[in-house]
Image (spheres, rainbow, N blue to C red):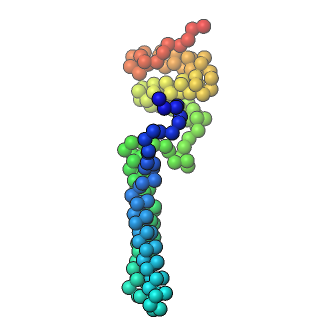
Amino acid sequence: MLRLGGPPNVPTVDTDDLTPRFIVRGILGGGTLVAAAALILVLIAARYIEWRLVTLVLVLWSAYGFFDTVMGNAIEPLGRFFAGQFVGGEMPPETRITIAQETATLERLLAAEPPPPPHRVVLAGIRLAEIYRICEHDPAKADALLVRLTSQYPDAPELKYVPPPATD
């Protein structure tokens, strides 16, 4: 039996760094280093500059920089954007809202004149009651809101799944 938290008995490979960007940068960077080493060897051995090797080093170096810039500034942000659109994900820090902001928004929605559609009011009320109960630790306020919603919208199917108010 293996120890809990011990090393695995089969060698593993960390594939988190094996991104296409990492692989292409490795190939272009390695090619640039090999061409630069060949240029230095030819320069030392033959005592003249081989301009085709200089061109190769500069082209590889430029391709490395170009590819890295395009991937970092265009392809990867687009990929993160589309991944976020298709499968969701964490909101960027500048767009996050606090629980206080969400509470204020939901309270304004419930007090709006004219009131929004009943479905929207009920869902906002359920979420607000959840915030009162979990974040503000005020179950009485949450229960009062749910009782009010139940009396206003007795036929709301969403309220069938909400637990009844606690009776102490």
Q: Residue furthest top?
A: 168
Instruction: Give 159 or 133, whichever is nearer the viewer.
Output: 133
**Quadrant where the C terminus is found in the figure:** top right
* Residue 82 percent location from the top left of the image: 38, 50
Q: Is residue 48 above or below residue 16?
A: below
Residue 120 visible: yes
Q: Residue at x 45, y 53 (%)?
A: 17
Q: Residue at x 60, y 28 (%)?
A: 135
* Residue 43 percent location from the top left of the image: 47, 87
Q: Is residue 90 above or below residue 164?
A: below
Residue 156 visible: no
Q: Residue at x 41, y 69 (%)?
A: 28
* Residue 116 percent location from the top left of the image: 44, 31
* Residue 19 percent location from the top left of the image: 41, 55
Quarter of the rendering containing residue 122: top left
Quarter of the rendering containing residue 25: bottom left
Instruction: Give 136 or 15, whichever is nearer the viewer.
Output: 15
Instruction: Give 53 or 118, whichever is nearer the viewer.
Output: 53
Q: Residue at x 55, y 11 (%)?
A: 166
Q: Is residue 38 above or below residue 127?
A: below
Please tell me how many numbered marks the rendered image carries.
0
Position of 88 compared to 134: left or right? left
